[in-house]
Amino acid sequence: MTYDSLPNHDEKKTNNNEILSNIDDGNSGTNNKISTEEDSLVWARQLYARLKAQHESTLIIEKQPQNDIKQVNDTSYSQETKSSNTQSIGLNNDERNINRSVSPDLKSPQISQFDSDFTWSSEVLAAKGVKVDQVTIEDIDWLTRLRRGLQKTRQGLVSQLLDILGDDPLTPETIDDLETLLLKADVGVNATDKVLSVLRQRMNEEIIDPTEGIQILKNELKNLLEEPIRESSQKVLTPDKNRLNIWLLVGVNGVGKTTTLGKLANLAVRSGYTVLIAAADTFRAAAVQQIEVWGQRSHVPIIANPSVNADPAAVVFDALNAAKAKGTNLVLVDTAGRLQTKHNLMEELAKIRRVIDRLAPNAAVESLLVLDASQGQNGLYQAMAFAKTIPLTGVILTKLDGSPRGGIALAVASEAKLPIRFIGAGEGIRDLHPFSSFEFVEALLAGK
Ligand SMILES: Nc1nc2c(ncn2[C@@H]2O[C@H](COP(=O)(O)OP(=O)(O)O)[C@@H](O)[C@H]2O)c(=O)[nH]1
Ligand SMILES: [Mg+2]
């Protein structure tokens, strides 16, 4: 048993708790919403100027002696309520500390050009009702990545959607074509039926022009994605600071569990949580090494047992004891990939769950199914099979980049009825983000 206790990394935490909490579904804050194209451009310009100034002030701070920097940090951590100015200095400064000794993809994103990526991302944030002084470079950077990630799904979807809708009001034939299109994009039968029945009903009541049709489509897709999220108690999945949180990552081989866990550890550390990793994939020879590399990148300790065929439940047992002793906020459990048809492996997952329930009965436990978006509808069968063994609480959708099957998000929400909690759109450490239905649908139908 190795317990890899790493040096205290408090100084490396950023102060941006909002990474894991400041997500809006776009249905609130309607008062702030920007109505015209011109307004949104003004908004984007203001935002750009502010982020640029913030970025430049960071560069000035970087030139100050180390003592001064420490002082700024301490101030920003100790203040519960900060002026946006103090916060931005503290945030960048902290991120700068992270950047000092790390590889390129750990660096916080930089302000880019005032280009179409920037304006599109700021438009989405404005439409969500986010205030101009709440937006970070990180938010813009993520939306840009998400839109790029969904490019393949969008390519087919949007161009054909435009063809189908044309310039004339919607007809029953257009709706039939829309059905084929949504099914082809892996949206699933239930979700497609629901969306189209709303469109049909509206069409019976009034004439719907294509722009309105797209708006109804977007709203219905967002509603479908939101439904399981609304039914859960948390809009965005964040660790509860007052108790131990245990997030179990499960799923078949190669879907991206270990990679996702590495990204999640980093996200949680950047958001100010203490994290511990339980390397409970004891089947694959290189699994422990792989997770150790991820742990080191975020300075997160790991509990592992590198001996062949070690009992995964025993690793979890040790990890929970270590977490309780250290007062850790979040334990992330990596598990071995398994075929949903292999009874003994599924049984083992249930055993891990029993250990958790016995040892940490008051913990907030999440069983998150990791699904590879490129597997399309097959992901749904996986979800159903896993749900039989352990109660699943959510889904993490990976590999949205490069897959034309991003529509699977809708099938997961409407058929497996599971909330999507995070999405991964790349192999880099920052390519994972809390899920926002609003952002997802806007990126899916961007250009529309
Ligand atoms: N393009 C892309 N690749 C990913 C993503 N997540 C994971 N991967 C890759 O998928 C492969 C399998 O990942 P791994 O974490 O080992 O899967 P596991 O077997 O479920 O633990 C690796 O090559 C990862 O880099 C993602 O969001 N996008
Ligand atoms: Mg793995």
Image: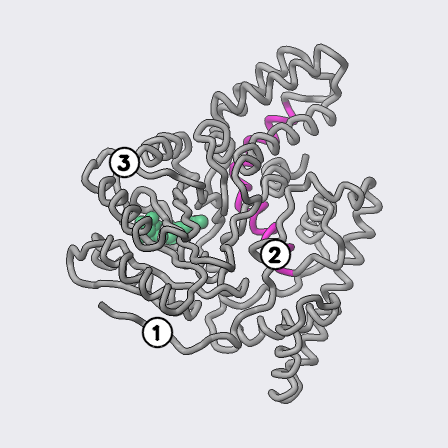
- Asked if residue 241 is positioned above or below residue 384 in the image, the reply reads below
Q: Are marks 3 and 1 in contact (CB under 8 Å)?
A: no
Label 3, label 1: how far apart the Cα atoms are:
35 Å
Q: Residues within 10 Å of mark 2 (few under 14, many from 20)?
A: many
Identify which amino acid the numbered label 2 is placed on.
Asp
| Residue 282 in view here | yes
Q: Residue at x 75, y 21 (%)?
A: 209
**Residue linked to disc 3:** 340
Identify which amino acid the numbered label 1 is placed on.
Ser
- Asked if residue 298 is positioned above or below residue 251 in the image, the reply reads below
Quadrant into which the N terminus falls: bottom left
Which of the pair 448/368 is nearer the observer?
A: 368
Q: Is label 3 in a helix, a strand or a loop? A: loop
Q: Position of residue 27 (x, y in %)?
A: 69, 39
Q: Which of the marked residues, 3 or 1, is nearer the chain's N terminus?
A: 1
Q: Residue at x 59, y 39 (%)?
A: 437
Q: Are marks 1 and 2 in contact (CB under 8 Å)?
A: no
| Count of residue discs | 3
Q: Residues within 10 Å of mark 3 (few under 14, many from 20)?
A: many
Q: Is label 1 in a helix, a strand or a loop? A: loop
Mark carried by residue 141: 2
Q: Which of the marked residues, 3 or 2, is nearer the chain's N terminus?
A: 2
Quadrant into which the C terminus falls: top right
Label 1, label 2: how far apart the Cα atoms are:
32 Å
Q: Position of residue 167 (x, y in %)?
A: 74, 21
What span is colored magenta in the figure? 137-163
Q: Residue at x 37, y 38 (%)?
A: 391
Mark 3, ligand 1, within 8 Å: the answer is no
Q: Position of residue 44 (x, y in %)?
A: 77, 53
Mark carried by residue 5: 1
Label 3, label 2: how far apart the Cα atoms are:
36 Å
